[in-house]
Image (cartoon, rainbow, N blue to C red):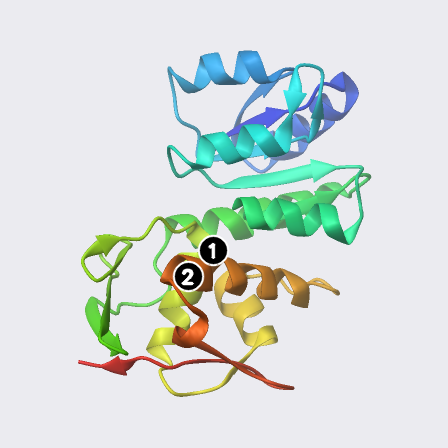
Amino acid sequence: MAHIYVVEDNESISEAVSGYLQLADHEVSCFGSLASTRERLEERKPDLILLDIMLPDGDGFIFAKELLSKQTIPIIFMSARESESDRITGFEIGADDYIVKPFSSKELVLRVAAVLKRTSGPLAHVSRHSWVLDDHKLTTDEDSHKAALDSESLKLTAAEWKILLYLSSNNGTVVTREQILDRCLEYSFEGYDRTVDTHIKNLRSKLGFSGWIENVRGYGYRFAGDAT
């Protein structure tokens, strides 16, 4: 059971989402504004936030960006805005998923379960490893879910951490977008190849340059660091 915040100003949607999640044995707190959400966050950190974008007292994108700059909380955007640019913006900010309204109760519960699974449980026991590339050293510690580049800690989202761990554990081997979706993001909904590309883009940016993760055209991605 997880404690989930539902931030949605439409009362009927909020009640329906809360009901779906409670049937899946989750604890749910509902908020109709960003102000009330901020106030509660000072008292208790949730396991996941379901966040609308257009709220009466602000923009969900801006709120998520500010929140994720200070702490790590899994976020799923839920919005009627269905354009590719909106979805990509959500993932660039650091969200773990983006679901378009109207959505089915089963899809919502499955996506919540997938995010909770990958943010709370280890992908595989890798322990501590390090790699070098062009005089730079990258280390990952599976036990603490931390990564560092040249001794500087990297602030990674849960999805970025899973992808980095998966790519590096398959060092030198090409992995497809479908494999990353299945092993790291744990869903395979049609059209989500761009989700992988967005997470890779963000991860490359945090690693300093794209050389750590090579794009193998027509196939997928390959981690290029040399194990030490």
On screen, residue 49 above or below 34:
below
On screen, residue 8 above or below 127:
above
Mark 1 vs mark 2, CA separation in Å: 5 Å
Identify residue for label 1. 159
**Dot 2 alpha-carbon crowd within 10 angstroms: few under 14, some 14 to 19, many 20 or more:** many
Label 1 SS? helix
* Label drawn at residue 212: none
On screen, residue 79 above or below 152:
above
Name the image quarter holding residue 100.
Answer: top right
* Residue at image coords 33%, 67%: 124
Left or right: residue 213 compared with residue 141: right
* Residue at image coords 67%, 43%: 108
Left or right: residue 210 compared with residue 78: left
Identify residue for label 2. 162
Label 2 SS? helix
- Residue 198 place in picture, x, y as percent: 59, 60
> Could you tell me the amino acid type at mark 2?
Lys
> Could you tell me the amino acid type at mark 1?
Ala
Left or right: residue 89 compared with residue 227: right
* Residue at image coords 61%, 74%: 178
- Residue 14 place in picture, x, y as percent: 70, 23
On screen, residue 226 above or below 118:
below
Name the image quarter holding residue 136.
Answer: bottom left
For residue 1, say whether it is visible.
no
- Residue 118 place in picture, x, y as percent: 45, 54
For residue 66, say whether it is visible.
yes
Q: Quadrant of the C terminus?
A: bottom left
* Residue at image coords 65%, 86%: 218
**Are the residues tagged 1 and 2 within 8 Å (C-beta)?**
yes
Q: Nearer the viewer, residue 60 or 182?
A: 60
Q: Quadrant of the N terminus?
A: top left
